[in-house]
Image (cartoon, helix red, strand yellow):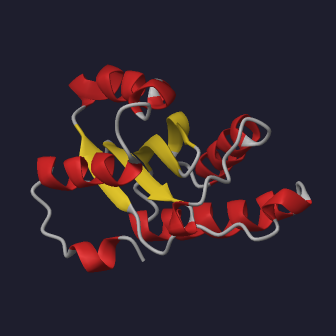
Amino acid sequence: MPQSLVHNYMHIIFSTKDRYPFIDKNISEQLYSYLGGICKNLECNPIIIGGHKDHIHILCLLSRKIALMKLIEELKSHSSKWIKTKNMTYQNFYWQRGYGGFSVNPTEIGIVEKYILEQDIHHSKKTFQDEYRAFLNKYKIKYDEKYIWD
């Protein structure tokens, strides 16, 4: 087969260090746009980016040219440096060390988009930790509670 054909939708989730609520209304839209630019530069077409005060959701089409781990590294390192230049409020900004990466069935893209758009509504009822545990359980990922929040 002379051609490499790949079509992997990824739902990526990661939080701020210690789930500190850095992502406020003053920076959220700019941050989402910045993260989208990083995705585009790495040929990982962003579908939607959103989140809540202490975490990010990215739905993108993962490029066949980059590993998920490298995409995450680029997203976190560049956006962390960028946000610290925006205002003294963000000088102590850091992302958590880990992340979640979940494959998405192409027929469920609309469902995931709606889910990401409605983060503020969703988090009026559920914490980030509960949301993240639900993803881990849905995808049958074994985890040790004492390590996932570091």
Residue 111: x and y, percent?
A: 30, 23
Residue 115: quarter of image: top left
Residue 74: x and y, percent?
A: 60, 66
| Horizontal side, residue 20 vs residue 3: left or right | right
Rendered position, 68 above or below 40 = below
Q: Nearer the viewer, residue 102 or 145?
A: 145
Q: Nearer the viewer, residue 51 or 111?
A: 51
The structure residue drawn at horizontal position 32% and vertical position 72%, both measured from the top left corner, is: 148
Q: Nearer the viewer, residue 80 or 74?
A: 80
Residue 4, visible in the rendered structure? no
Rendered position, 92 above or below 117 = below
Rendered position, 15 above or below 47 = below
- Total numbered circles: 0
Residue 150: x and y, percent?
A: 42, 77
The structure residue drawn at horizontal position 90% and vertical position 62%, both measured from the top left corner, is: 88
Residue 106: x and y, percent?
A: 26, 29
Residue 85: quarter of image: bottom right
| Horizontal side, residue 18 vs residue 76: left or right | left
The structure residue drawn at horizontal position 42% and vertical position 71%, both measured from the top left corner, is: 98
Residue 40: quarter of image: top right
The structure residue drawn at horizontal position 45% and vertical position 61%, both measured from the top left corner, is: 65
Q: Nearer the viewer, residue 80 or 53?
A: 53
